[in-house]
Image (cartoon, rainbow, N blue to C red):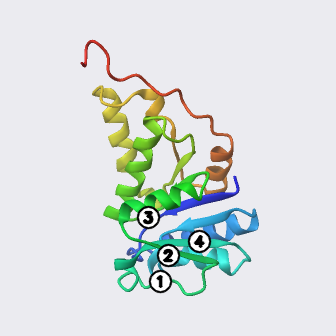
Amino acid sequence: MQSITVFCGASEGYNEVYREVAYSIGSMLAAKGIAIVYGAARTGIMGAVAEGALQNGGKVTGVIPHFLVHKELVHNGLTELITVDTMHERKMHMHRLSEGIIALPGGWGTMEELFEVLTWSQLGLHKYPIGVLNVNGYYDALRVLCNNMVQEGFLDECVASSLIFTEDPEELLQLMEQYTPPPVPTWLTERTA
């Protein structure tokens, strides 16, 4: 992989470990020559990801809608800054610039971004690996939710298992590099039509 999109919060969170891991992800990707695409903020763990990469010689592209430029306090030291009109354009642009996605802790925006790219994957619109770095157990509840979706018949097992969960950044990258996309399931059948 040449580039990875990182979805994460523009807030710090209450535990310093989130910022530390975000910085280390940026640093690790830079050391491996993998460019980062992210939401362009200098605040929160978004800013920590960018700093980790930039301070270690990495390339960082930020993508942000015009209306968030002041609200999210854009990072001034990015390799490239791209401004777009809407949140949807932001996601589309980030997606086009990368070959994989990593989700770190975040709020509604991070969840919305993650679920949209998961839906695109399920529909066969991309074949990129999607990884969740489960820092401090942050995504334990998401794993439980995914299992419940499968058990209740709303999500195919192979689609659910394509979301890569781990607590270790190096392992996450290794699993993403080994990723094989599942076949696109046919969920509309006689029974469901």
* Crowd rating for badge 2 (residues with CA inside 10 Å; few <14, some 14–19, many 20+): many
Task: Tell me, yes or no, whether the two marked residues, 1 and 3, touch with CB atoms within 8 Å.
Answer: no
Of tags 3 and 2, which is closer to the observer?
3
| Residue plotted at (38% across, 49% down) | 115
In the picture of the structure, the residue carrying the numbered disc 4 is: 61
In the picture of the structure, the residue carrying the numbered disc 2 is: 40
In the picture of the structure, the residue carrying the numbered disc 3 is: 90
Of tags 1 and 3, which is closer to the observer?
3
Structural distance between the alpha carbons of marks 3 and 2: 10 Å
Q: Earlier in the sequence, mark 3 or mark 4?
A: 4
Q: Quadrant of residue 86?
A: bottom left
In the image, residue 163 lies at what x, y percent?
49, 42
Q: Earlier in the sequence, mark 1 or mark 4?
A: 4
Q: Earlier in the sequence, mark 2 or mark 4?
A: 2
Q: Earlier in the sequence, mark 1 or mark 2?
A: 2
In the picture of the structure, the residue carrying the numbered disc 1 is: 74
**Circle 3: residue type:** Arg
**124 and 86: which one is in front?**
86
Task: Tell me, yes or no, whether the two marked residues, 1 and 2, touch with CB atoms within 8 Å.
Answer: yes
In the image, residue 128 lies at what x, y percent?
57, 45
Q: Quadrant of residue 10?
A: bottom left
In the image, residue 49 lies at what x, y percent?
56, 72
